[in-house]
Amino acid sequence: MVQEKTAKDFHMQLGQHTCKGSLHAISSSGKFFGIPNNRKLHVWKVITHDHEAAPIKRIALHHTKNLTIFAFHPTERIVATGDVTGRIMIWRSFGSRTFSIGGLTNGRAMNNEDERPGVRGDDDADSCDTWHWHSTEVKCGKEGVLMVWQLDTRKKKFLLRIRSPLLYFTTSLDPSLSSVSCADNRIHLLKMPSMQIFKSISGIKLPCSFLEISEGLCSRFIFDQTTGLVAFPTENYRIQFYSLFDDREDFEVLVTLMALSPDGSMMNAAETKLPEEGLGGLVCLKFWTSGPQSKGFSLSTIIYEPHRDAGVSAVAFHPARHMAVSSSYGGDFKIWARSHELQQREQMLVNRGWTRHALGSYKKKPMTATAFSGDGSVQAIAAKTIITIWDPEKNVLVAVIIETLETVACAMDVSYFAVLALLPQSSKCAELTETKRDGRDGVILLFKAGEPIPVTTWSVKKPFE
């Protein structure tokens, strides 16, 4: 009966000082249990079986800002808290009055701040030190930096450039090993106390937020059937290549827009460096070739400002030749070709790089999408809401199709391509009006290369949000 009453009282106290999603932790010794609540840290002493009749004891440590995280010292009566301003508080000998056997009862004032530096009011602690870290909230490394302090000397060590915010830090029974978990779904294993990363385990990274920064940056994935690699655009302008066969990350490159050749041997990447305070912006186009046994890609050619001051909107490879195309919001597209020269240099084929083969535009309209037909005989380029059909060999305009265009794609084995076109908001055409009334928002049109009339069409509608 006593045990039931004690548990009930404990649950009532928890309900008074916690909210949904509250962080909580138990000390390594199992003697203390803590929960932060706004600007307070509540700490309970865990009641053992041989003291079940003892009253529940709790202390509250007060702070001036909301707390975000806390941790108990593994062997000493010390607790550390972090707040929203980036400060870390070290509370020493907490609960020495309240939790001691035969000690003073909770609530007795002890306001001599000279004897208890940094402690607010009659909080039950011998001292409270404040350490400053950075201006953002402390959440185990908001900026992707791991910092380790020595409590006695305040000396600190940094592990910088982890490339992703840190979520959790975990120690092990072996004091020479620890780990950090990152927001990009990666775990780093560390050697302590040197803080050296000796192994990283990476899963599939979360989707990127490029579209919130600059229009036209690709957020889709690309799959290479030959090697089983999937390319994902991720945060920090990187592309992750993940092996579905091996269930692990293969490699990663820093790009904002990319295309793979159909055989997976070449990659085209557009890199955008955003300006800082209006200065320093740069766009470059990079061509990569795969290494031996498909062990990653090596950089072949860099083309700075491929479309002058305009951003690259789309890139695509020719299905059968060493040829690629890039389009821009500045109103032009460029066809690039790779040239080789066989030299007697260790009997190796020397790559002479990629150079511009042709230049085209249509009424100075922004070029927003591009694709080759399956056999490479025609090329479709979207000029805002107009589809233009080109002969890539001669760089001659073949046909023009006017629609409210969203995207374009080509089949791999035949000279057909499909476009997704949005239906106009208002139309005099009764058929379109009836279609809109049925809830359909657009059509997919399948064209045969060189013919302006679609072979067939499908009505589509947007999913409910």
Image (tube, grey):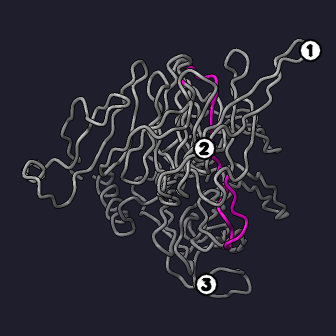
Please name whichever residue, 2 or 461, is drawn nearer the observer in this view of the structure: 461
Give the number of the mark in front: 2 or 3: 2
Element marked by disc 1: loop
Q: Is residue 378 left or right of residue 164?
A: left
Q: Residue at x 34, y 57 (%)?
A: 6
Residue 223 spot, x, y in % from top left = 49, 27
- Give the residue at mark 1: 344
Q: Which residue is mark 2?
A: 334
Label 1 – label 3 distance at C-alpha: 88 Å
The numbered mark at residue 110 is 3
Q: Quadrant of residue 55?
A: bottom left
Figure check: 418 above or below 77: above
Looking at this view, is 363 or 60 the one in front? 363
Q: Earlier in the sequence, mark 2 or mark 3?
A: 3
> Which residue is farthest top?
347
Residue 444 spot, x, y in % from top left: 26, 38
